[in-house]
């Protein structure tokens, strides 16, 4: 049979054609249920339009996010195509360069946003979004979405760092008071150490290749509280060098707790055991009565074993790391996401405006697990006592808020040499030498 | 489910495209006029592989070489990245560690593997004894890293130990020790993990080679009055020289590229980083692709002579036969 040799190519082409047909998208059914669409009228109608969204948020958090904007989709007719990836930080730059950028990107770090804005491709935020942010967020927050004077990205959700976790029952039994100032906290630490039943602090900085990051949070908290927001801003933007005496002082001040073997590391061993203790397990001795206090962000709430009551009268509760100079008021560090757009289509702009709105903040916070610094957020939307306390702190007009410093620094420092510096410092390298070495790694531009 | 279906579809399409392309090439080659048929056949069948090599290997290699001379924003910066590599204390420690790794791992693995292979040769239960040592070869490096991280785990004195080694130390009345925190011996503790994995590989290859040494030679040596050491030194070792070279070079190359163990166990902290780990850290975490590329280039230059040597020895062996 002479025709045999045609068979393979013909068959293959046929298969290809078939599979390509199968590939074409089917019609999506957009059902309308009886949601109240009146708050969404201002976003317009975008029937049949799609907005692609890309971010680091995955799993249950991603599902909650999609639930939070489902009503928006329903009322405006637009479809939100969401994609979450843990590789976002490296992939977003690659995709933007390759001309395959998403319509909307949710940036977990202002530094990354700034890189993308400088590389071009990011669209400045529309006026409607800018006005919303002026209305709903503090100027501090707007600054983190602004690059070289142009406002690009509205903030979305937030987390609050610098909580000190403790067991209310232990404090009550021992007659210890929640400290109101840094000095009181040191006095309390000494008292607990002298008491001898447990060490005052437990800490764990082990986090795989990111080992050291919980320590950067400690140092950021101290720099902000001891030196004030102006110095903090200079520090993260390299207005002052990393080995400036003010920063070395802050390191040493942090070391009064972290490098003191009388104060750490309850339940695990000596100072250096901080480095080999996983950050998620480090708080456990608070529950076991082997350590009194543990410094970690609000998301520590999820690290306690299931069934642990997180409440002022529960198994564990948290107070904010107190001010060092009480006359300057409370200053807190935290993190959050910034929403920027690579397209300026009407549907993308409407979506940006929605994410910056109070409706979205309430919709999302009601689902639990996160908070937002949006002033339009109703504290009643919070699902836990801790979320309520965090929202109150964020919304308080007297609170000075600063973004997690290591997220603002260039990657070579913020997600490399600063972590490594903390590790070396806990392992015995003097603060000055650590600061010098981090300064040496700051990229020269 | 939908997601899985989509993936299957993608795989299916890729296979179909591949089959269609091959079919097309075969068709063209077959239909070609007699005069160019031979050349066309050669080109037609070499081209797909050659193109894939060019796109997947040569192009990235060239690109990386150029990248090695640029800074974080992609501007050319001359040899700055190499200056950094050979002056920063951290980067120097990385180079030093890589040297320690490449000297110790192949040497220890081969010595242990060879000794074990010789001692259990023709012993009772040889296969079971072999399987025991060969098992770590089947464990992924990340898995081995996690296992050994737990083995070295530390708790303070007076607290119940969770790591095996420290539990033994405490039981013997010694203080627990932080194995991974103190340079330079922590590098040795990491090297033990790699030796643990590679000894099995060396043992299996060398054991097979020993069985290939002609029995007449061994018997002749014995009749001539050679003691066991002399038999080993003058008959066995020369007889398995080819296998020894292959084992040594293969382990050396694997060691030069070691990354998973270091990243899993210390993430390159405490002065334990090696070139491959530092390359990844610089390129993908610190946002310094130039430095990462420079390290990759140095790594490539270090591996190259070993590959060449390996290929030459293999060719000589073939010529002898």
Image (cartoon, coloured by chain):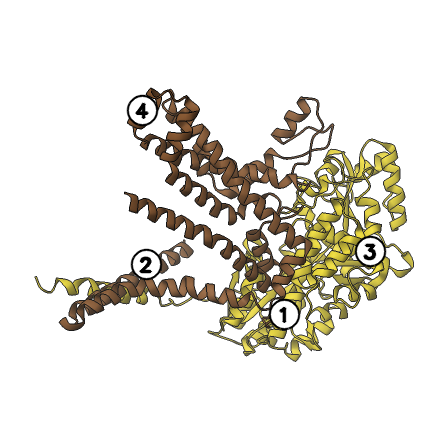
Quarter of the image containing the C terminus of chain A?
A: bottom right
Question: Pointer 3: residues within 10 angstroms few (<14), some, or many (20+)?
Answer: many
Q: Are marks 4 and 3 in contact (CB under 8 Å)?
A: no
Query: What residue does disc 1 label?
Result: A115
Which is nearer the N-term, disc 3 or disc 1? 1
Question: Pointer 1: residues within 10 angstroms few (<14), some, or many (20+)?
Answer: some
Q: Are marks 2 and 3 in contact (CB under 8 Å)?
A: no
Query: What residue does disc 4 label?
Result: B220
Alpha-carbon span between mark 3 and mark 1: 28 Å
Q: Chain of mark 1?
A: A
The residue at the far right in this view is A327
Q: Nearer the viewer, mark 2 or mark 3?
A: 3
Quarter of the image containing the N terminus of chain A?
A: bottom left
Which is nearer the N-term, disc 4 or disc 2? 2
- Where's residue B27, x and y in %? 19, 67
Alpha-carbon span between mark 1 and mark 2: 38 Å
Query: What residue does disc 3 label?
Result: A248
Q: Are marks 1 and 2 in contact (CB under 8 Å)?
A: no
- Where's residue B20, x and y in %? 26, 64
Alpha-carbon span between mark 4 and mark 3: 75 Å
Alpha-carbon span between mark 1 and mark 4: 74 Å
Per the image, label 1 sits on a secondary structure element best described as helix
Q: Colour of chain B?
A: brown
Q: Front-most of A265 and A306?
A: A265
Check chain identity for marks 1 and 2: say if they share one. Answer: no
Which residue is at a point 36% across and 60% down the rendered structure image? B10
Q: Front-most of B292 and A242?
A: B292
- Where's residue B155, x and y in %? 69, 33
């Amino acid at each position: 049979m002479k025709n045999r040799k045609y068979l393979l190519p013909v068959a293959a082409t046929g298969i290809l054609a078939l599979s390509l047909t199968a590939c074409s998208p089917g019609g999506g059914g957009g059902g309308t249920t009886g949601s109240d669409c009146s708050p969404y009228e201002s976003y317009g109608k975008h029937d049949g339009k799609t907005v692609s969204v890309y971010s680091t948020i995955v799993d249950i958090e991603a599902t909650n996010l999609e639930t939070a904007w489902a009503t928006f989709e329903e009322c405006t007719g637009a479809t939100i195509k969401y994609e979450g990836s843990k590789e976002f930080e490296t992939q977003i730059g690659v995709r933007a360069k390759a001309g395959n950028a998403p319509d909307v990107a949710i940036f977990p770090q202002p530094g990354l946003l700034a890189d993308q804005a400088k590389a071009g491709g990011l669209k400045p935020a529309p006026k409607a979004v800018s006005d919303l942010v002026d209305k709903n967020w503090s100027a501090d927050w707007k600054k983190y979405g602004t690059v070289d004077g142009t406002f690009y990205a509205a903030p979305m959700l937030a987390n609050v760092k610098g909580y000190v976790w403790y067991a209310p029952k232990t404090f009550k039994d021992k007659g210890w008071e929640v400290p109101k100032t840094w000095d009181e906290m040191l006095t309390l630490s000494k008292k607990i150490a002298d008491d001898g039943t447990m060490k005052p602090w437990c800490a764990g900085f082990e986090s795989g290749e990111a080992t050291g990051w919980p320590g950067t949070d400690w140092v950021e908290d101290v720099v902000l509280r001891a030196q004030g927001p102006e110095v903090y801003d200079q520090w993260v933007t390299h207005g002052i060098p990393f080995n400036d005496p003010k920063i070395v002082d802050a390191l040493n001040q942090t070391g009064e707790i972290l490098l003191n073997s009388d104060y750490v590391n309850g339940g695990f061993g000596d100072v250096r055991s901080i480095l080999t203790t996983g950050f998620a397990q480090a708080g456990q001795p608070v529950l076991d009565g082997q350590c009194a206090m543990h410094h970690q962000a609000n998301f520590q709430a999820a690290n306690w074993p299931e069934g642990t009551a997180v409440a002022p009268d529960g198994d564990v509760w948290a107070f904010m790391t107190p001010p060092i100079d009480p006359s300057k008021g409370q200053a807190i560090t935290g993190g959050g996401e910034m929403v920027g757009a690579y397209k300026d289509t009407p549907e993308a702009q409407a979506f940006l405006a929605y994410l910056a709105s109070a409706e979205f903040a309430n919709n999302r916070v009601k689902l639990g697990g996160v908070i937002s610094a949006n002033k339009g957020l109703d504290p009643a939307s919070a699902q836990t006592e801790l979320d309520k306390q965090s929202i109150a702190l964020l919304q308080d007009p007297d609170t000075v808020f600063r973004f997690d410093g290591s997220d603002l620094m260039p990657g070579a420092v913020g997600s490399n040499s600063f972590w490594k510096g903390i590790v070396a410092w806990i392992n015995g390298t003097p603060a000055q030498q650590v600061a010098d070495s981090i300064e040496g790694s700051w990229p020269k531009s | 489910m939908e997601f899985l279906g989509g993936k299957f579809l993608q795989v299916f399409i890729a296979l179909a495209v591949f089959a269609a392309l091959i079919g097309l090439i075969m068709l063209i080659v077959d239909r070609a006029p007699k005069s160019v048929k031979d050349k066309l056949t050669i080109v037609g069948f070499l081209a797909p592989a050659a193109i894939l090599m060019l796109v997947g290997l040569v192009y990235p290699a060239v690109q990386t070489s150029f990248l090695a001379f640029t800074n974080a924003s992609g501007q050319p910066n001359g040899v700055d990245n190499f200056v950094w590599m050979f002056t920063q204390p951290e980067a120097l420690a990385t180079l030093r560690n890589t040297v320690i790794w490449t000297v110790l791992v192949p040497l220890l693995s081969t010595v242990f593997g060879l000794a074990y292979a010789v001692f259990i040769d023709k012993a009772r239960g040889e296969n079971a004894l072999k399987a025991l040592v060969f098992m770590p070869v089947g464990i992924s490096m990340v898995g081995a890293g996690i296992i050994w991280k737990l083995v070295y785990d530390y708790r303070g004195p007076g607290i119940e130990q969770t790591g095996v080694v420290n539990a033994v130390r405490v039981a013997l009345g010694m203080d627990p020790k932080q194995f991974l925190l103190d340079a330079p011996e922590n590098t040795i503790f990491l090297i033990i993990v790699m030796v643990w994995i590679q000894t099995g590989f060396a043992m299996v290859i060398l054991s097979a080679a020993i069985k290939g040494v002609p029995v007449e030679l061994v018997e002749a040596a014995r009749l001539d009055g050679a003691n066991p050491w002399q038999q080993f030194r003058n008959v066995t070792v020369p007889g398995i020289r080819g296998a020894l070279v292959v084992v040594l070079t293969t382990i050396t190359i694997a060691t030069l590229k070691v990354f998973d163990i270091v990243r899993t166990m210390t993430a390159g902290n405490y002065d334990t980083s090696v070139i491959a780990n530092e390359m990844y850290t610089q390129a993908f975490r610190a946002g310094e692709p130039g430095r990462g590329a420079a390290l990759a280039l140095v790594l490539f230059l270090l591996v190259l002579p070993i590959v060449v040597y390996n290929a030459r020895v293999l060719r000589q062996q073939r010529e002898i036969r």
